[in-house]
Amino acid sequence: MSPDLIDLSYLLAASLFIIGLKGLTKPRTAVRGNLLSALAMLIAVAATLRHQDIVGVTGLLIAVGIGSFVGTILALKIEMTAMPQLVALFNGLGGGASVLVAGAYLAGKEFSARVASGACFTDVLTATAASGLIGAVTLSGSLVAFAKLQELKFVKDVSFPGQKLLNLFLAVGAIGLGWMLVTQPEHAQAWYWVMACVATGLGILLVISIGGADMPVVIALLNSYSGLAASATGFVLNNNLLIIAGALVGASGLILTRIMCKAMNRSLGAVLFGTMQSGGTSLSDEEVYTSVRSTSADEVAMMLEVSQNVLIVPGYGMAVAQAQHAVRDLTNLLLNRDVDVQFGIHPVAGRMPGHMNVLLAEADIDYERLKEMDEVNSTMDQVDVAIVLGANDVVNPLARTDPNSPIAGMPIIDVDKARTVIVIKRSLSPGFAGIANPLFAADNTLMLFGDGKKAITEITKAFDDA
């Protein structure tokens, strides 16, 4: 391919990345944005492989076919509940790729020739060190995040005295080794891989102390790290498109991290230095659950029959039960009876940013009915029935009332202010934060125990028969 055609392909891909990213900001345009971004990546990979004469057209088509097959299998086989784990793995693979590409550059003939000539290329060496350091942290941190999300028994929240000091020591050590790489290019390979090992340990320690409730923030931050590592790799390879694409991912990831931090009442500094840990004390289950009242699907149906405004607050339990399609059926039935139905979406409901939006969109629920936390809170006192489906920490009033709670100060959806609250849950078990929820024992709350999908289906049938 001619240089002009390569540049034109890169320009087209960069433009599609930006347009696609813009589309991802709204549920209605998210699918189109995702498709445009995928097309941009296809153009970018094809142009790069042809530009570097890595493969011919036949090889390129084979590679695209294999990648498409694997991607299709993953898309069809991975359950929606496991999507956060898949995102964590994608982040880790992106970081690992940056480490390997930067390491391959140091082992290449071009680098050896530059060192032999005595030429000064501090900028490229700095980018190489940044790529390896950030990429290694992203790889190991993402694997730990995956293990936590998968609830693997051998990965637990680990905290010990001096952990923050050790993290700081490893961070300074990794940066120091990167500096040695830049100042002593003749030994760059040795310094690089030692730095990568130290950074790998740093990534593990940064994430392993973080509780499951904070995983949405971690996923967003690691996504940003993977983008920054890719952007640094772009400088190593002198690939403008990789620089642009990595910068877009890095910047959008940091913005999303900031949104998640606000939603979790965490500071960005605490996230960056790995100090997000659940702590504090709160009331025991026996003290909280003194007046829990249960209900039935028939009783809930009767309440819905005389309601005008219904709010549904989904959580991870809805994802586990795969209840989104049952929720859609109930929503459509309510709308046909002139009952207004809205969905209150907490930014960190589920296990990754936008988890609930993805589930509800999969069930073809109208995007306009998905409301942000602040919007539903402002009209909560007008809600006749609030149905909490599998959510826990994001509706826990202790965030407002108990300064010793691990979630103290975290913005929540104030469903306790609705006229009637129906909580659909298998049991009174705690959420990720591991604390009791006084909402379950509130005077205006009724518990409907059972599987989320089954419960919603029974309510729908009872309401339809009424």
Image (cartoon, rainbow, N blue to C red):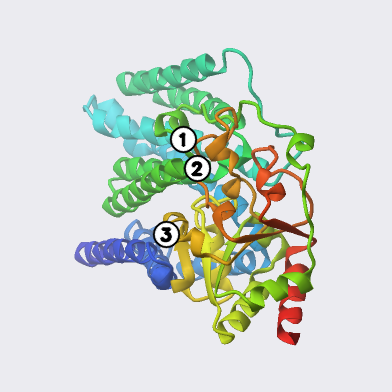
Circles 1 and 2: CB atoms closer than 8 Å: yes
Q: Which of marks 3 and 2 is nearer the N terminus?
A: 2
Determine the CA span between mark 3 and mark 1: 21 Å
* Furthest residue in direction left, as rendered: 4
Disc 2: CA contacts within 10 A as few (<14), some (14-19) or many (>=20): many
For the N terminus, the quadrant is bottom left
Dot in front, 1 or 2? 1
Above or below 219: residue 360? below
- Residue 465 quadrant: bottom right
Above or below 465: residue 71? above
Instruction: Report the amino acid beneath label 2.
Output: Val
> What residue appears at the point 72 percent right and 58 percent down from the top-left corner?
446
For this view, does 148 lie left or right of residue 403?
Answer: right
For this view, does 160 lie left or right of residue 38?
Answer: right
**SS category of the residue bearing label 3:** helix
Q: Residue under circle 3?
A: 375
- Image coordinates of residue 181 in percent, x first then y, are 37, 22
- Image coordinates of residue 5 in percent, x first then y, are 23, 67
Q: Residue under circle 1?
A: 266
Determine the CA span between mark 1 and mark 2: 9 Å
Q: Residue under circle 2?
A: 217
> What residue appears at the point 27 percent right and 46 percent down from the top-left corner?
238
Instruction: Report the amino acid beneath label 1.
Output: Arg
